[in-house]
Image: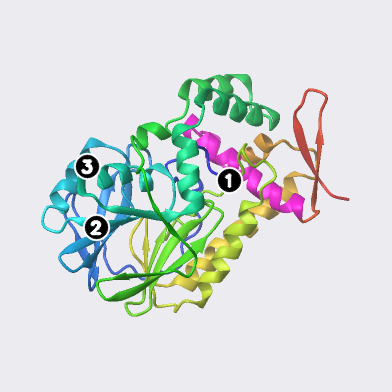
């Protein structure tokens, strides 16, 4: 699972981008929209991070709108929403996953417009855990997890001081929701949008595919130039999210290659299969790097130094450590790595004999 203060940030090192077709060279200006398919409009909202934007989507539904993802809980974002939704208020809000830039304004949209909020069960529960869980206990457990994987005292202190940013990005949550399940059909504007579940980046990430329009609202599951963060985190230390993520990519190969992919970051594109190939190849390369490094005993922090550049800030470090562990866990689950715990409680991994 991702860090609870995660902004749905992608993996820090970019994957090589294949030759994709980008129908639009520029995103919409603030508080404006671009029609990308009949009844589908593109909105871009700001983020207060190095990854400085998120793409959100409006689906026409008669005199109203269905909103897909909500943006980070900023007053600037809410001001943009008031302008954009002035003529066609939302009746539904579909949230792809629980990360703050997607869930952040779900409560506000529900309260302001009376819109129904729908998401998957896992994302709903994780949002509540992240928003309302005991922050002291959660932080202590997270830092103990990082310490066991080799993080030094100085950076542990920095992470403690940083705390949990999730409530800043998600000021409120809706009181009620409607559950989305894999294969569900959302009828919007007379068109069928099928729910497609992806895993790995988030527990139960909901994508939306409209065969009539050849459009996939991909959320963070497929991005055009960077790969989404896939992390092992302390609530589920023996999870294998990278295996789930790669399996989810394979499910998308059934879609036509000329599908218009609407990602949460970057520009809309066509060339889905090439992008799936590039993302899979990227992770294969990472797994090979981990295997080579673990010819000697390595902590997860040692693997971070192999996989990522050395100048990571404290915000990026949590993503990098979780991602390093995701690659380690896949190899360990396959029997290619073994683990041992030192007397000081630090875990190291070694290539299996």
Helix, strand or loop at disc 2? strand
**Residue 255 magenta:** no
Does residue 228 appear anywhere in the picture? no
**Residue 316 magenta:** yes
Would you place residue 268 above or below residue 191 in this image?
above
Q: Give the range drawn in magenta.
A: 306-333
**Gap between marks 1 and 2, in whole Å?**
34 Å
Does residue 187 appear anywhere in the picture? yes
Residue 88 position by quadrant:
bottom left
Q: Residue at x 39, y 32 (%)?
A: 167
Residue 231: % across, % down = 58, 45
Q: Name the residue under label 3.
A: 78
Mark nearer the N terminus (3 vs 2): 3
Mark nearer the N terminus (1 vs 3): 3
- The one nearer the camera, 165 or 273, is 165
Q: Which mark is residue 91?
A: 2
Would you place residue 181 above or below residue 192 in this image?
above
Q: Is the magenta stretch mostly helix, strand or loop?
A: helix
Residue 202: % across, % down = 51, 51
Q: Which mark is residue 231?
A: 1
Q: Which mark is residue 104?
A: none
* Front tag of 3 and 2: 2
Whether residue 35 sits left or right of residue 96 in the image: it is: left
Q: How crowded is mark 2: few (under 14 residues within 10 Å), some or many (20 or more)?
A: some
Residue 154: % across, % down = 58, 19
Whether residue 147 sits left or right of residue 78 in the image: it is: right
């Amino acid at each position: 699972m991702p860090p609870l203060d995660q902004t749905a940030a992608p993996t820090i090192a970019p994957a090589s981008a294949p030759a994709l077709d980008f129908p639009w060279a520029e995103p919409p200006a603030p508080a404006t929209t671009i029609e990308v398919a009949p009844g589908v409009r593109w909105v871009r909202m700001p983020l207060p991070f190095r990854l400085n934007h998120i793409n959100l989507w409006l689906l026409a539904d008669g005199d109203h709108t269905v909103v897909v993802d909500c943006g980070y809980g900023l007053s600037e974002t809410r001001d943009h929403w008031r302008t954009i939704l002035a003529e066609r208020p939302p009746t539904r809000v579909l949230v792809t996953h629980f990360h703050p830039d997607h869930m952040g304004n779900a409560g506000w949209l529900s309260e302001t417009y009376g819109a129904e909020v729908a998401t998957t069960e896992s994302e709903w529960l994780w949002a509540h855990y992240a928003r309302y869980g005991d922050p002291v206990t959660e932080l202590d457990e997270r830092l103990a997890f990082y310490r066991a994987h080799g993080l030094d005292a100085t950076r542990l202190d920095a992470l403690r001081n940083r705390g949990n940013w999730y409530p800043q990005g998600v000021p409120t949550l809706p009181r009620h929701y409607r559950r989305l399940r894999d294969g569900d059909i959302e009828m919007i504007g007379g068109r069928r949008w099928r729910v497609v579940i992806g895993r790995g980046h988030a527990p139960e990430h909901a994508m939306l595919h409209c065969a009539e329009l050849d459009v996939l609202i991909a959320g963070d599951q497929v991005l055009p130039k960077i790969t989404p963060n896939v992390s092992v985190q302390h609530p589920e230390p023996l999870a294998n999210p990278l295996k789930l993520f790669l399996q989810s990519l394979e499910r998308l190969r059934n879609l036509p290659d000329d599908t218009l992919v609407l990602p949460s970051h970057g520009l809309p594109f066509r060339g889905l299969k090439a992008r799936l190939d590039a993302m899979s190849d990227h992770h294969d390369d990472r797994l090979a790097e981990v295997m080579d490094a673990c010819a000697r005993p390595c902590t997860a922090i040692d693997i971070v130094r192999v996989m990522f550049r050395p100048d990571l800030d404290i915000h990026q470090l949590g993503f990098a450590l979780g991602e390093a562990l995701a690659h380690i866990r896949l190899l360990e689950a396959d029997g290619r790595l073994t683990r041992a715990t030192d007397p000081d409680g630090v875990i190291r991994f070694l290539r299996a004999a």
